[in-house]
Every structure is written in structure tokens, then in C-alpha cells.
């Protein structure tokens, strides 16, 4: 019996490419039709920041209608919400502010736990690879000081691993 799954396999690299190509139409709609100034999207996660709750509620309805009619997609009812902006929004592991991005505390903690486990189970070479991946991820945030402080491969902090 064939499994008739809908969508793309999450771990597949083509999923990232298809998400960017397919959802470009959504980006254009948000930019040119809704005229949103503060819009972020990473794969299938997106964020719109606006001071007016009523504006966001109208935009949410328009987005739902557009996604269904033009892209044959539905927005997840439990993950699509409008709430007050309190200075930052946690988004794909970053705390996004209007003009900065910081690594969220849970993201850093989760990485450090994973790094210690990798070091114990697979050794220093694998842990260095993990650090390089995290460093690349963190490069999209304002995190140079944090990275310097938590880098387990600097001579002063070798004991932290």
C-alpha cells in the first residue's frame, strides 16, 4: 500500500528550495498587496510586526484567503496568532526586535547541551564541527560578544566542554 503523504519531506534539501520558490508568491503578496513594512519569513514560518491589532487581524484573514486560493495551503490554526508586540518576538531561534536579532536564551542553552553531548559521545572533532555550524547560524544575530564568551575552543574556556 502506498503512503499518500502530502508535502515535502522535512529533512530533504529540496524542501528548502521548494519553500523559497513556492512561497515567493506569498512574499510578493505581503509586500505589494498588504504593504507590510516589517515582514520576516524563513521557510514556512513568517512574522509580521505592526502596531495595530485590527490591521494584523485583517491581514491574517487576507493571508489565509490568499494562501488557500492561490497556493492551496492552509495556515495552522494553533500556530497562527496575533498578539501584542512586547519589544521582541521569538522567531526561528532568534529574538527579533525591530532593528536587531539576538540569539534566544533557549536556543543557546539547547546548543550548549548538544555540544557537551557531542563532545562526550563523538569527540572533539565532531564538537568543533557543531561549533562551526552554530557559529554560522549565530552570524545572523548580533552575538559576537556572546559567541566569544561561550566558545568552548578558546584556551581560557577549555574546561567548559
Image (cartoon, rainbow, N blue to C red):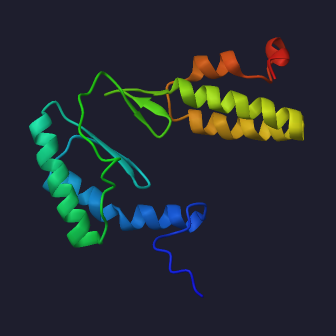
Query: Which residue is at 35% across, 47% downward?
Result: 79
Q: Nearer the viewer, residue 126 or 141?
A: 126
Query: Which residue is at 56% across, 67% downward?
Result: 9
Q: Quadrant of residue 143?
A: top right
Residue 59 location in percent, x, y? 15, 49
The C terminus - image quarter: top right
Q: Is residue 156 left or right of residue 109?
A: right
Residue 139 location in percent, x, y? 56, 34
* View extreme (bottom): residue: 1
Q: Quadrant of residue 116?
A: top right
On screen, 78 above or below 110?
Answer: below
* View extreme (front): residue: 1
On screen, 48 above or below 112?
Answer: below
Query: Which residue is at 50% across, 27% downward?
Result: 104
Q: Nearer the viewer, residue 51 or 83?
A: 83
Residue 34 location in percent, x, y? 15, 51
Q: Is residue 27 left or right of residue 117?
A: left
Amino acid at each position: 500500500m502506498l503512503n499518500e503523504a502530502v508535502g515535502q519531506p522535512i529533512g530533504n534539501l529540496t524542501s528548502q528550495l521548494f519553500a523559497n520558490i513556492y512561497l515567493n508568491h506569498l512574499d510578493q503578496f505581503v509586500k505589494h498587496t498588504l504593504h507590510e513594512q516589517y515582514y520576516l519569513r524563513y521557510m514556512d514560518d513568517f512574522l509580521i510586526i505592526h502596531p495595530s491589532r485590527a490591521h494584523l487581524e485583517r491581514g491574517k484573514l487576507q493571508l489565509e484567503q490568499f494562501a488557500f486560493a492561490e497556493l492551496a495551503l492552509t495556515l495552522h490554526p494553533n500556530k497562527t496568532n496575533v498578539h501584542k508586540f512586547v519589544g521582541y518576538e521569538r522567531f526561528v531561534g532568534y529574538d527579533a526586535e525591530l532593528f536587531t536579532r539576538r540569539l534566544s536564551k533557549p536556543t543557546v542553552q539547547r546548543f550548549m547541551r548538544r555540544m557537551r553531548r557531542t563532545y562526550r559521545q563523538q569527540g572533539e572533532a565532531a564538537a568543533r564541527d557543531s561549533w562551526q555550524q552554530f557559529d554560522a547560524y549565530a552570524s545572523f544575530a548580533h552575538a559576537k560578544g556572546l559567541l566569544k564568551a561561550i566558545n568552548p575552543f578558546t584556551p581560557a574556556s577549555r574546561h567548559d566542554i
